[in-house]
Amino acid sequence: MACRAGTAPDTDLDQGEKYIKFAAYAERWRQARVIGWALETQTRIESNLRLHLVPAFGNRALRSITQTDVLLWLAERLGAGMAPSSLRLYFELFDAVMSGAVTDKITPDNPCDGIKLSQVFRGLSRAPKWVPEREDVLRLFGKVPERYHGLLWLGAGAGLRISEALGFEQGPRCLDPSNEELHVVQQLRYAPREYGGFYLSLPKGVRSFDPAAGAVDLDPMVAAALDYHVREFPPVEVEMPDITSGPTVRRRVPLLFTTVHGNPFTDRTWSAEWVKWRRAAGWPEEHGGFHALRHFFATTLITNHADPKDVQRALRHSTLSITLETYVHFWPRRERRRGIVGEALKEAVAGRWDLN
């Protein structure tokens, strides 16, 4: 059923067509095709539109529906426990209606284009198996030595991965308080054979050095925590190769976080410390790694109704789909608005019905 109509030129439309609601166009679309459908198909299409698409999109101007809206709808339905097989049917119907609108030149593009349901469904496997609550994170702060609280702030307050946090350095390359930005442009790696030990590389999923692409909002509390850390625990300069900009360059890197002996952390030395703190805080042995702080960061934004695109940018995901798929169970479900119209017309029966 889902066919692709490409993109139509944004031609001039009369005002009625330009602002037509999804429900009105979907009904027109259905009536124009019903003659060619078997009775069973007629019943199914009418029912699926009425029960699953109109409640979600019916009152929206058709041209205003975006890909983000569609992805959020998919995430909400999956989060509510809808079977992927059923959701596929509803998505394909929605795709067909929007494709018809493109053909009819009512909307310039189809917001379903570019959405691959197989990837959306596969994203469920990326969902975090455990996400710490606020109390879990606060308890961890109580068990981790103060010299590493800045690391916790970078994880829980900015969503950095552990290698990105351990590679964080003092200076404008990584921190720009004047513009309230934090730049995630490098991660600390360890390869004795290839680089003689520690080196800096681009973060996960990044192909070229671009401070603007790695810029995320600097939370005031994170800024204050890092400022305190630098005053109490001055950075340690460590000479190492830097391959973030292409050719290998050796430079002295003022790392914010090192061991008590002033050495960068290897995976092994970090893990040994983290396991002690995690156990002391009562975190689970499985799924209780530093990455859980990134999940806390993401879900805190989501449950406080941050815009999905802002969450994507904060996590530095390459696509919005990845963000929505990973945290599908955490997106707040839209509350069904009940009684609004009845309340507005309540005076019509004043004094005649017992409404208590």
Image (tube, rainbow, N blue to C red):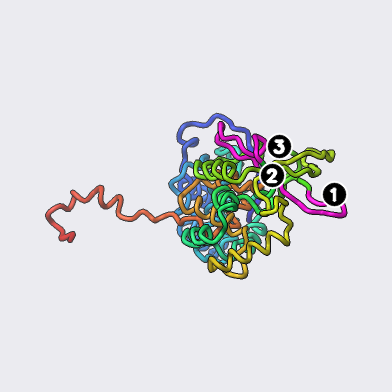
- The quadrant of the rendering that contains the C terminus is bottom left
| Residue 195: assigned label | 1
Q: Which residues are magenta?
A: 170-198
Q: Name the residue rendered at 46%, 61% in the picture.
A: 135
In primary-sequence order, the first of circles 3 and 1 is 1
Q: On screen, 253 above or below 348?
A: above
- Of mark 2 and mark 1, the one earlier in the sequence is 1
Q: Which residue is mark 3?
A: 210
Depth-wise, is mark 2 or mark 3 nearer the camera? 2
Q: Position of residue 268 (x, y in %)?
A: 73, 62
Q: Which residue corresponds to mark 2?
A: 236
Q: Position of residue 316 (x, y in %)?
A: 63, 46
Comparing 111 with 327, the one in front is 327
The residue type indicated by label 3 comes to: Asp
Res 66 → quadrant? top right
Q: Element under label 3?
A: loop
